[in-house]
Amino acid sequence: MTDSEIQQEGLKALVDQLGEVGAERFIMLLLREPFDYTEWRKNLWINVPVRELSEQAMRHVHSAEKNWIKMEATRPALSELRESSKSSYTTGKEQPQE
């Protein structure tokens, strides 16, 4: 993933979770106050038991797998749509619907 893609995805995640105003406030707070990511990470899970971290990680993996399966199920329809769009773009004409 490129730096630009990470920035875009990060901003999208912030907006999705905090809304536009909240995301902007968060970014301003980061710019205004010194922030040491390494120190923050050292203390992030300090009071969380290993078992709880493991359970959270497994829930995340399970959720990601379910989302992947859903995405794969829509792939044929998306491929059809892309092909239809390509052909109408290259010919400049709408393709007849079957």
Image (cartoon, rainbow, N blue to C red):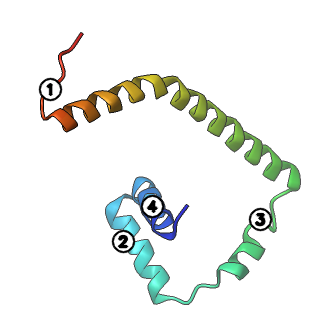
Marks 2 and 1, the one that precedes in the sequence: 2
Q: CA distance from mark 2 to mark 1?
A: 42 Å
Tag 1: amino acid: Glu
Q: Nearer the viewer, residue 92 or 73?
A: 92
Counting residues from the N terminus, which is met first, the one under dot 3 or under dot 2?
A: 2
Q: Which residue is mark 4?
A: 14
Asked if 97 appears above or below 61 in the picture, the reply is: above
Identify residue for label 3. Answer: 45
Q: Residue at x 46, y 67 (%)?
A: 7
Q: Is residue 11 above or below residue 86?
A: below
Give SS at disc 4.
Answer: helix
Q: Secondary structure at mark 3?
A: loop
At label 2, the amino acid type is Glu
Q: Earlier in the sequence, mark 3 or mark 1?
A: 3
Q: Position of residue 70 (x, y in %)?
A: 54, 27
Mark 2 packing: few (<14 Cα in 10 Å), some, or many (20+)? some
88 relative to 66 in the view: left or right: left
Structural distance between the alpha carbons of marks 3 and 2: 26 Å
* Residue 65 coordinates in the image, percent (x, y): 66, 34
Query: Which quadrant, please, contains the N terminus?
Result: bottom right
Tell which circle, 2 or 4, labels the residue nearer the N-terminal end: 4
Is label 4 or label 1 in front? 1
The kind of residue tagged 4 is Leu
Q: Residues within 10 Å of mark 3 (few under 14, many from 20)?
A: few
**Cα separation between marks 3 and 1:** 55 Å
Residue identifier under label 2: 24
Q: Position of residue 25 (x, y in %)?
A: 39, 73
Label 1 crowd bin: few (<14), some (14–19), many (20+), radius 10 Å = few
Q: Residue at x 64, y 85 (%)?
A: 36
* Residue, far front: 91
Q: Residue at x 57, y 34 (%)?
A: 67
